[in-house]
Amino acid sequence: MKTIQKVVGNRQLLNEVLGGFRLQGTNFTAWCRENGIKEPNARKYLLGHNPDGKKANQWRQKIIDAAQQPMKTN
């Protein structure tokens, strides 16, 4: 079972993720649509809303991995 590290969500993380998708030639909106998550919810997770929620942490990690961004952990 993969252990999920707690990632600190904030504006910088959101911007890094958005940039990561752009560097891949895609965008955050398209990725959200392809992965079945509503974009407003994904943005909230990246901004740190519900920081202790299991679902938020799982989605945050999945989005970061897809954007290929280094993580900032507590």
Image: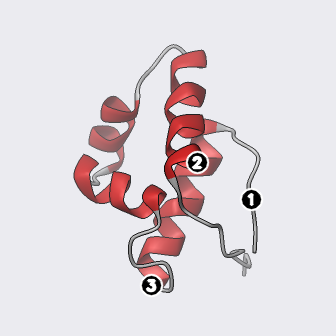
Q: Is residue 38 visible?
A: no
Q: Is residue 28 left or right of residue 68?
A: left
Q: What residue is shown at x 62% (from left), y 67% (from top)?
A: 8
Disc 1 marks which amino acid?
Lys
What kind of element bears circle 1?
Answer: loop
Which dot marks residue 53?
Answer: 3
Q: What residue is shown at x 42% (from left), y 77% (from top)?
A: 55
- Packing grade of label 1 (10 A; few <14, some 14-19, many >=20) is few
Quadrant containing the N terminus is: bottom right
Quadrant position of residue 28? top left
Question: Residue 64: image x %, image y %?
Answer: 60, 49
What kind of element bears circle 3?
Answer: loop
Q: What residue is shown at x 60% (from left), y 17% (from top)?
A: 23
Mark 3 vs mark 1: which is more N-terminal? 3
- Packing grade of label 2 (10 A; few <14, some 14-19, many >=20) is many
Q: Please tell me which residue lies in front, 56 or 36.
A: 56
Disc 2 marks which amino acid?
Leu
Mark 2 vs mark 3: which is more N-terminal? 2
Disc 3 marks which amino acid?
Gly
Which dot marks residue 13?
Answer: 2
Mark 2 vs mark 1: which is more N-terminal? 2
Question: Residue 53: image x %, image y %?
Answer: 44, 84
Q: Tell me whether circle 2 and circle 3 mark residues in contact (CB < 8 Å).
A: no
Q: Nearer the viewer, mark 2 or mark 3?
A: 2
Q: What residue is shown at x 44% (from left), y 73% (from top)?
A: 56
Q: Tell me whether circle 2 and circle 1 mark residues in contact (CB < 8 Å).
A: yes
